[in-house]
Amino acid sequence: MKNLSSTWFLEFPIDSEHKQYVLLDFLQAINKEIREDNIYHPIRKVFDLIRTLKLVELAMNGQKLPAGELKDKEKKMIENFRTLKLSGDDYFELQETIRLSLDCLYRYAEIGSNIWKKIESRISVYNLNPKQENPNSGILLVRNMITDEVHPFWWSKYTNLSSVGVMMKNVKMKNNFYSISYDYLINEILTELKIESKSIKITVMEIYEDFDLNSNILKIAKDLFIEDLEIQLELL
């Protein structure tokens, strides 16, 4: 997929007309991806662009930023903006660029949200051991409700000096088809990973659509799961 830098609108020349050509060229590539049924990354990128533009708009208007919710790259982007020290003309052009870009991107976001909601309506999620609180690792079982194939994933928390996140990897199994209950699959995974079930969280996602490991709906399901986990971890 064609990419667009997160700071594209801050790069010189800061000219609103020029920036609209840059954005429209990118959105043409987005349209092509969506027509080819590759919707996950394009929709995610549109929402990321909107968030970045809104953050700079808040900073320009002297409004308080959601400091606790900012990612490292967003903090750096705000710092870069503040060090630009734009002249009056450039400042006006940047305001126009943000206003026009948001108007355009909101239309794409509305379409994307409708597509996303339809996809999410085909996904149900629940925990097999709901009493397990604040775990550092766990198993995600994603079941294809059409074929009964189950795609198992192992996830674990990682931390560094500035952030907390989640790593995830696919677990290979000889037989990964659902039969009567999830217990057999879980026991096989635990044996393979050589861990005890008491120390981990076990989550099931059931998708009412035929899919494989490369399908958009699986990517979206995993993304939603990881985002929810990361939010929980940041609140600890």
Image: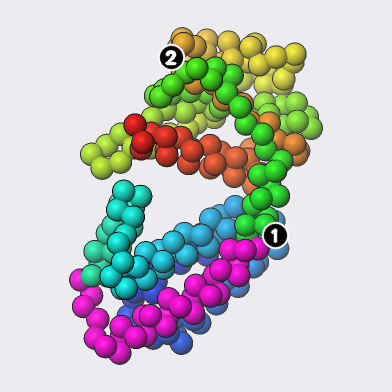
Outermost residue on the bottom side: it is 89
| Type of amino acid under label 1 | Glu
Compute the Cα span from label 2 to label 1.
42 Å
**Residue 116 x/y as whole percent:** 64, 52
Residue receiving disc 1 = 36
Q: Of 80 and 58, which appears nearest the observer?
A: 58
Up the image or down, 107 lies above or below 217; here it is below
The residue positioned 64% from the left and 68% from the top of the image is 31
Is residue 25 in the magenta section? no
Q: Is residue 170 visible?
A: yes
| Type of amino acid under label 2 | Ser
The figure's colour scheme reads rainbow
Magenta stretch: helix, strand or loop mostly: helix
Mark before the other along the chain sequence, 2 or 1: 1
Outermost residue on the right side: it is 146
| Secondary structure of residue under mark 2 | helix
The residue positioned 49% from the left and 72% from the top of the image is 102
The residue positioned 49% from the left and 79% from the top of the image is 100
**Residue 136 x/y as whole percent:** 39, 24
**Residue 130 x/y as whole percent:** 53, 20
Residue receiving disc 2 = 199
The disc at residue 8 is none
Q: Residues within 10 Å of mark 2 (few under 14, many from 20)?
A: few
Up the image or down, 235 lies above or below 102; here it is above
Residue stretch rendered in magenta on the structure: 83-111
Q: Quadrant of the C terminus?
A: top left
2 or 1: mark nearer the eye: 2
Choose top left, top right, bottom left or bottom right for residue 6.
bottom left
Q: Is residue 25 visible?
A: no
